[in-house]
């Protein structure tokens, strides 16, 4: 019956049924027809289990980071950060693209969501790209790929959910993706410059002397201090052990409200109210999905789905590196069909026992999941971030696809391989700060 349940889940997702409803439909089949004898399971046992799983303080951080990201997006907080980054690389051919990449990394370290990062940074950068002579297909592809840094540079909701499901430290998950995130910034920056090296239409700003650059840095830096203090405060508080992730997420909300209202004046009280309502709706959808998947994952474990998947992998190869390759392929395929949070909540209960069986660190696997979910967000047919970038930047998918594939093949695939097969890149910071074993 487990195979019928999987068929129901995948088919409903493909035809566009909402994710929580798809999870519930698969759960309902197993409740009525699951078990060794086909008589099903007691719903009275599963419903309290779902509520007990949701009774976690760490889930509050998801709501807070979603709200903080929305406030930053509309509060003009990111614009000052972009102006300051431009001082250092604006005079390089392709430098404006590097400004966009670094700005996505910085903004992603606060909001933790790819679409929010793209909406905010893209709205600021796309007019600059157009004025700078960038092909808009290239610009949209670049921003789509760079916005995924919001899923790697912590904190982010995906890893909070992963830590909640797998029962490991949220902080260790956050630290695991910093290395891959830095590698991604470097690779995307060099790829951007290489792809634009012969494009004479790209505007390059006049080189400035060291004194001029310093004066500009000081002028723009003063304006950017309130915005830049936020990631320092949030990340410093978490990594310094001063605050928990939940406390830092709440502090980020209370900090960015007055900054958006009275410092940068991008907010007003009416806009703030609408942001709270929209964030509450988004959070509610995520919580319903988490509740439904907590019951579904319990049913999958009762049906021994992880054991069946492990047996399938072992029938192909017992080499853990080949199994890791198959897991990566599986995660990318799932990412092509659904959003990043859905991939995490669905696959983690299935794959985590397999990861433990083949001797891979759960913290290492957290980074693998982070990179894979990022790749899935720009991989057709789903590719929500890629399509959103085209809408925000005003480019057709035909213009975007070629440069996007270049960034994916020569950017994200190497990052995924490094993350998977060079664990020290992932585990260096967790080992250094939390003494996580290699």
Image: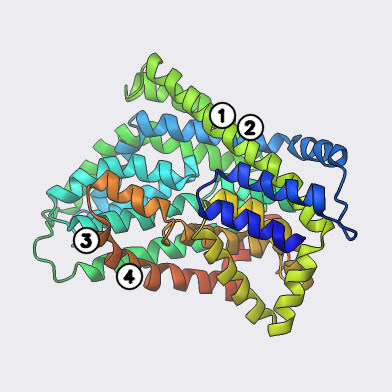
Mark 4: which secondary structure? helix
Per the image, the residue denoted by label 3 is 94
- In terms of sequence position, does the residue under pointer 1 or pointer 4 come before the other? 1
Q: From this viewpoint, is residue 211 visible?
A: no
State the separation of the CA atoms marked 3 and 2: 39 Å
State the separation of the CA atoms marked 1 and 2: 6 Å
Query: Mark 1 touching mark 2, by CB under 8 A?
Result: yes
Query: Mark 1 touching mark 4, by CB under 8 A?
Result: no
Mark 1: which secondary structure? helix
Q: From this viewpoint, is residue 386 visible?
A: yes
Residue 420 spot, x, y in % from top left: 58, 72
Report crowding for label 1: few under 14, some 14 to 19, many 20 or more residues within 10 A (C-alpha): some
Residue 298 spot, x, y in % from top left: 79, 51
Per the image, the residue denoted by label 4 is 406
Left or right placement of residue 274 versus residue 431 in this view:
left
Residue 430 spot, x, y in % from top left: 65, 59
190 in relation to 155, above or below: below
Give the mark toward the camera: 3 or 4.
4
- In terms of sequence position, does the residue under pointer 3 or pointer 4 come before the other? 3
Q: Residue at x 17, y 56 (%)?
A: 134
């Amino acid at each position: 019956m487990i195979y019928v349940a999987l068929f129901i889940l995948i088919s409903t997702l493909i035809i566009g049924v909402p994710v929580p409803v798809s999870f519930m439909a698969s759960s309902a089949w197993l409740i009525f027809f699951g078990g060794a004898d086909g008589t099903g399971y007691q719903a009275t046992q599963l419903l309290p289990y779902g509520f007990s799983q949701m009774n976690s303080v760490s889930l509050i951080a998801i709501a807070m980071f979603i709200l903080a990201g929305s406030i930053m997006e509309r509060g003009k907080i990111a614009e000052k950060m972009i102006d300051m980054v431009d001082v250092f690389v604006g005079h390089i051919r392709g430098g404006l693209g590097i400004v966009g990449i670094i700005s996505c990394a910085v903004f992603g370290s606060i909001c933790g969501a790819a679409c929010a990062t793209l909406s905010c940074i893209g709205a600021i950068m796309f007019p600059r790209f157009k004025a700078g002579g960038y092909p808009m297909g290239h610009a949209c592809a670049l921003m789509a790929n760079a916005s995924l840094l919001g899923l790697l540079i912590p904190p982010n909701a995906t890893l909070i959910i992963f830590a909640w499901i797998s029962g490991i430290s949220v902080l260790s998950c956050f630290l695991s993706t910093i290395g891959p995130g830095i590698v991604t910034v470097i690779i995307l920056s060099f790829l951007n410059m290489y792809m634009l090296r012969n494009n004479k239409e790209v505007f390059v700003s006049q080189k400035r002397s060291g004194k001029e650059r310093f004066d500009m840095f000081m002028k723009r830096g003063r304006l950017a201090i309130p915005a830049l203090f936020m990631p320092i405060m949030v990340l410093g508080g978490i990594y310094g052990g001063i605050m928990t992730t939940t406390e830092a997420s709440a502090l980020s909300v209370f900090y960015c409200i007055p900054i958006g209202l009275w410092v940068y004046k991008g907010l007003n009280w009416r806009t703030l109210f609408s942001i709270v309502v929209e964030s509450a709706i988004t959070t509610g959808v995520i919580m319903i999905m988490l509740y439904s998947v907590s019951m579904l994952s319990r049913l999958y474990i009762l049906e021994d789905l992880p054991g069946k998947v492990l047996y399938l992998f072992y029938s192909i190869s017992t080499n853990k590196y080949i199994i890791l390759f198959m897991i990566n392929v599986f995660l990318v395929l799932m990412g092509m069909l659904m959003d990043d949070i859905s991939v995490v909540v669905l696959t983690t209960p299935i794959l985590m026992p397999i990861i433990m069986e083949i001797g891979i660190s759960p913290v290492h696997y957290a980074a693998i999941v982070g990179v894979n979910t990022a790749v899935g967000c720009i991989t057709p047919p789903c590719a929500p971030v890629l399509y959103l970038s085209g809408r925000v930047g005003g480019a057709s998918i035909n213009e975007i696809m070629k440069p996007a594939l270049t960034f994916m093949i020569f950017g994200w695939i190497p990052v995924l391989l490094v993350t998977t097969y060079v664990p020290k890149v992932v585990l260096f910071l967790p080992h250094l700060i939390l003494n996580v074993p290699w």
